[in-house]
Structure formats: C-alpha cells, structure tokens
Image: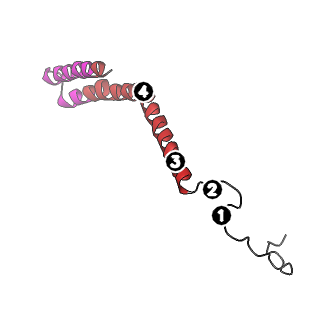
Amino acid sequence: MYLIVIAWFYVTLMMALAEAASPQGSILGAVITFVLYGLLPMSILVYILGTPARKRRLKARREAEQRAWDAAQAAAAPSASLPDAGGHAPGAAEDAGIAAVRKEP
C-alpha cells in the first residue's frame, strides 16, 4: 500500500513542479495541484485501506482490557461472587412507622 502512496506522491510532485516551472503556471497553481491531486486523495485512500488494521488493534486492546479486568476481579475477592459471603452482619430493620418520601402527584 505504501509503495502506491509514495509513487503517487512522486507523480503529483512532478506535476506540481511542471506547473510551477511553466511560463503560464504559478506557485499557487503548483501548491493547489499537489494538494488536490496528491495529499487529499492519498490521505483518503490510506484512511480507507487502514480501517481493517485499526479495527484489529481496537479489538485486541478491548480483549486485553477485558482479560486484565477479569483477572483483577478474580484476584481481588474470590468469595465476592457468593451471596452473603462478606462476613458482615445483616443491616437492621427500618422503623415501620416512618413513611417513605415521594413526590406529590
């Protein structure tokens, strides 16, 4: 892929130099030629052709983060997944005479 990009940049650079060196050409025309025929199309092509590699890197990073999180959870509290295995006493019951606070309809 990069060989195509380098070759196309060479071609557009030569086009821009020919534009700048010609009697009817200008430096501004050469810059516009290089940007519109070289940089813009090649940046779009590199972005599109690089999409599968970006997706693979993203997927690998997410899998690594998931494995690290799973390992941290397993090492932190192996009995935390069991109900009431914390060793603490249950909370006290609330007073039944106090009404719940809520919005008026």
- Count the marks: 4
Q: Which color scheme does this rendered protein use?
A: secondary structure
> Does the residue at mark 2 contact the one at mark 4 (Cβ under 8 Å)?
no
Mark 3 or mark 4, whichever is nearer to me: 3
Question: Which residue position holds label 1?
Answer: 86
- Looking at the rendered structure, the secondary structure element under dot 1 is loop
Relative horizontal placement of residue 75, taking residue 32 as reference (left or right)? right
- Looking at the rendered structure, the secondary structure element under dot 4 is helix
Label 3 vs 1, first from the N-terminus: 3
Relative horizontal placement of residue 33, taking residue 72 as reference (left or right)? left
Disc 3: CA contacts within 10 A as few (<14), some (14-19) or many (>=20): few
Residue 71 image label:
3
Q: What's the residue at 54%, 56% (across, down)?
A: 76
Label 3 vs 2, first from the N-terminus: 3
- Label 3, label 4: how far apart the Cα atoms are: 36 Å
Mark 3 or mark 2, whichever is nearer to me: 2
Q: Is the magenta region chiefly helix, strand or loop?
A: helix
Residue 48 image label:
4
Q: Position of residue 62 (x, y in %)?
A: 49, 40
Q: Which residues are magenta?
A: 6-32
User: For the residue marked with disc 4, what is the amino acid?
Assistant: Ile
- Looking at the rendered structure, the secondary structure element under dot 3 is helix
Q: Position of residue 73 (x, y in %)?
A: 55, 52
Label 1 vs 2, first from the N-terminus: 2
- Looking at the rendered structure, the secondary structure element under dot 2 is loop
